[in-house]
Amino acid sequence: MLISMTGFGQGEAANAHSTVTVEVRSVNHRFLDIAFKLPRSLQNREPDIKEIVRGKIARGRVSITISVESASSGRGVALNEAVLEQYLSQLRAFAKRHDLDDRVSLDALVGLPEVVTTKESEPGEDELWPLVDKSLGEALDACNRMRIDEGKALEKDLVDRMKLIEKTVGAIEKLAPAVAKRQVEALRKRVAQLAGDVAIPQDRIAAEIVMLSDRTDITEEVTRLRSHVAQFNGALKDGGEVSKRLTYLLQEMHREASTMGSKASDTEVIQHVVVLKEETEKLREQVQNLE
């Protein structure tokens, strides 16, 4: 089974006071790269979240977004008594120095800067973590189901393209003998035109023909290409983390196709070689999305 690196999943868990929602998004990446968007109360849980993700996803850029809604959350009010005491002390000292009434109203005091502060109140880490653990697991499972579905679609496309490559290699192999024959005939004609009335030893011509045959023979390239195709198909059947292996095989297939094109120097063969190169490039783009 092949697994894509592209996926999305969402999970949700709640108790009497809070609801935690987790969204997981994954895209193509060379390694496992995890990014977070967390509430402040869960910042210390990043290592735990990473460990859970590593247990379910092997490769890809994974973005984790966790949001919390709580009936008990809101803005809390706090009286800064230390600041208030300093204000009172300073005001009374000032009143004494200037022989003023030292009575200060509460309304005046609470209006002074930093005497009354507000802050967001939210559930604590220990209360939220069981909800995060559950919803994160659900989101990762949903993301992986999508990655598997994407992998199946990719596998079908890879298999279809590989069939076209096999067909194209077969067509080149059938053309090869005729191409070699035409090249030999072209060599004989060229030698005859250049020599004119001068007699050329047949053994010299035979040696040139052998050298030409060696330079233009694509048997080895065809054999290696068929081997790469077989290994590629085998890796698809095995499944798992195959992206790197498939990428290497496609690089080798592209190399063999280029060599065949330069050796054959035949219009029809080159047309087939172009198809091989195009398909291997498309395949390389596809396998980059596999885990």
Image: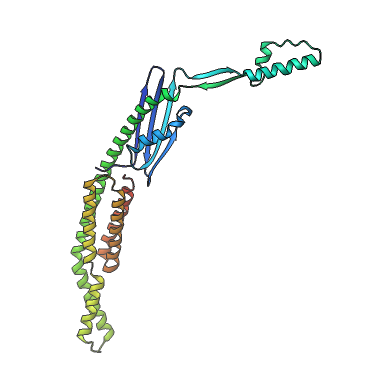
Q: Is residue 17 above or below residue 245?
A: above
Q: Disc count in the image?
A: 0
Q: Is there any visible trace of residue 265 in the rendered image?
A: no
Query: Can the viewer see residue 224 in this picture?
Result: yes
Residue in front for this viewpoint, 280 or 26: 26
Q: Is residue 207 above or below residue 215?
A: below
Question: Residue 98 versus residue 175: which sits nearer the camera?
Answer: 98
Looking at the image, the residue that sits furthest to the right is 98
* Image spot of residue 262 (x, y percent): 30, 67
The structure residue drawn at horizontal position 20% and vertical position 65%, both measured from the top left corner, is 175
In which image quadrant can residue 56 be found?
Answer: top left
The answer to which of 136 and 94 lies nearer the viewer is 94
Residue 245 point in image, percent of width and height: 29, 52
Quadrant in the picture for the C terminus = top left
Please state the horizontal and vertical placement of residue 171, each as a whole percent of the image: 20, 60
Query: Picture quarter containing residue 213?
Result: bottom left
Work out whether 30 lies above or below 206. Answer: above
Q: Residue at x 19, y 72 (%)?
A: 181
The reply, left or right, for residue 262 in relation to residue 107 is: left
Check the image and tell me how it is coloured: rainbow
Q: Position of residue 19 (x, y in %)?
A: 40, 22
Q: Residue at x 22, y 62 (%)?
A: 222
Q: Residue at x 37, y 21 (%)?
A: 14
What is the quadrant of residue 128 in the picture? top left
Quarter of the image that includes the N terminus: top left
Q: Nearer the viewer, residue 75 or 150?
A: 75
